[in-house]
Image (cartoon, grey):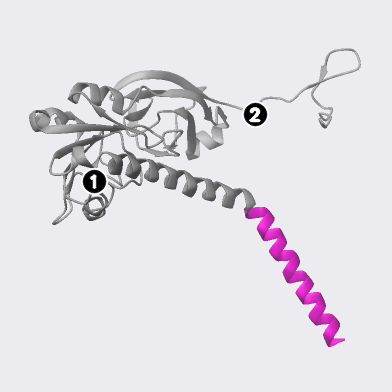
């Protein structure tokens, strides 16, 4: 009897483990893709820097276009010195401060983070390097061309949710935008007010939290901005869930009948 109970307990634990694996499969796959994407991004940047080290060492190097974790984030630059075989002064320019790029330099570091608005101050004695969302780099001919190439105008493919209930609008909710070039130069305004955003997946995802709304209305308008200029407008509708209706025998619609399952 004791042995049977042991086998039963082992079987239950194994079943729970399988269920846990199945439930977290998509989440783990997403995390693995994110780590692999970050690794490819950093590898592309370091390969570019290593291949052009003769141009970069002992120079003031202005870096534009980087985002998220990179060889320039949260570091003083010692790794880059080892990579190039000699030091360089790195001036990283970003549209705004974020958790990866806070303005200023680390103590005893060779990397300083500055706003894009002052990127052209060292133009007379710097080399300008621009990286795209895949980590591909190029040397720009001057500051202006570097700024133009650093963060292209965003493209919005979709946003979720497009419709919320009045209860959700009153409580506040999260919204996600998917597209391209949704990097640090992209901002969001809700009802004309600037809203904090989080950027991820190398400019393919931007998320924000819509604050609670106590004013009854039919929609929440938003504006996506690029370096402070509006480039896309949309709205999130508010109201009851859309009625799901199916055709009845007479060719009309009967909302009370369940919708048939669609099978491949």
Verify whether residue 202 appears in magenta. no
Secondary element type, mark 1? loop
Please name the residue shown 71% across and 61% down the image: 18
Residue 233 in the image, given as x and y percentages of width and height: 43, 19
* Residue 251 or residue 13, whichever sits in front: 13
Residue 152 in the image, given as x and y percentages of width and height: 35, 24
| Quadrant in which the C terminus is drawn | top right
Q: Would you say residue 241 is visible in this rendering?
A: yes
> Image check: 44 left or right of 128?
right
* Residue 91 or residue 23, whichever sits in front: 91
Q: Would you say residue 221 is visible in this rendering?
A: no
Please name the residue shown 38% across and 41% down the image: 44
Q: Specify start and end residues of the magenta stretch as a single range.
A: 1-24
| Quadrant in which the N terminus is drawn | bottom right
Verify whether residue 18 appears in magenta. yes
**Location of mark 1 (residue):** 102
218 relative to 121, above or below: above
53 relative to 226, above or below: below
């Amino acid at each position: 009897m004791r042995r049977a109970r042991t086998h039963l307990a082992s079987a239950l634990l194994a079943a729970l483990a399988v269920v846990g694996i199945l439930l977290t499969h998509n989440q783990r796959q997403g995390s693995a893709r994110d780590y692999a994407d970050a690794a490819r991004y950093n590898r592309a940047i370091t390969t570019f820097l290593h291949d052009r080290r003769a141009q970069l060492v002992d120079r003031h190097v202005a870096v534009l276009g980087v985002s998220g974790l990179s060889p320039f984030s949260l570091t003083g630059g010692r790794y880059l010195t080892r990579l190039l075989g000699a030091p360089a002064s790195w001036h990283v320019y970003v549209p705004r401060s974020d958790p990866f790029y806070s303005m200023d330099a680390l103590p005893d570091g060779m990397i300083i983070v500055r706003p894009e608005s002052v990127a052209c101050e060292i133009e007379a004695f710097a080399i300008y390097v621009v990286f795209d969302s895949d980590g591909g780099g190029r040397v720009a001919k001057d500051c202006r061309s570097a700024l133009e190439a650093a963060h292209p105008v965003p493209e919005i493919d979709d946003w979720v949710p497009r419709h919320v209930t009045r209860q959700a609008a009153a409580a506040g909710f999260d919204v996600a935008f998917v597209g391209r070039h949704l990097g640090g130069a992209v901002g969001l305004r809700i009802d004309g007010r600037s809203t904090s955003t989080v950027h991820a997946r190398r400019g393919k995802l931007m998320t924000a939290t819509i604050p609670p709304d106590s004013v009854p209305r039919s929609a929440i308008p938003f504006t996506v901005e690029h370096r402070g200029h509006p480039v896309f407008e949309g709205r999130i509708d508010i109201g009851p869930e859309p009625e799901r209706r199916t055709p009845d025998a007479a060719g009309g619609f009967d909302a009370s009948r369940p919708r048939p399952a669609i099978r491949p």
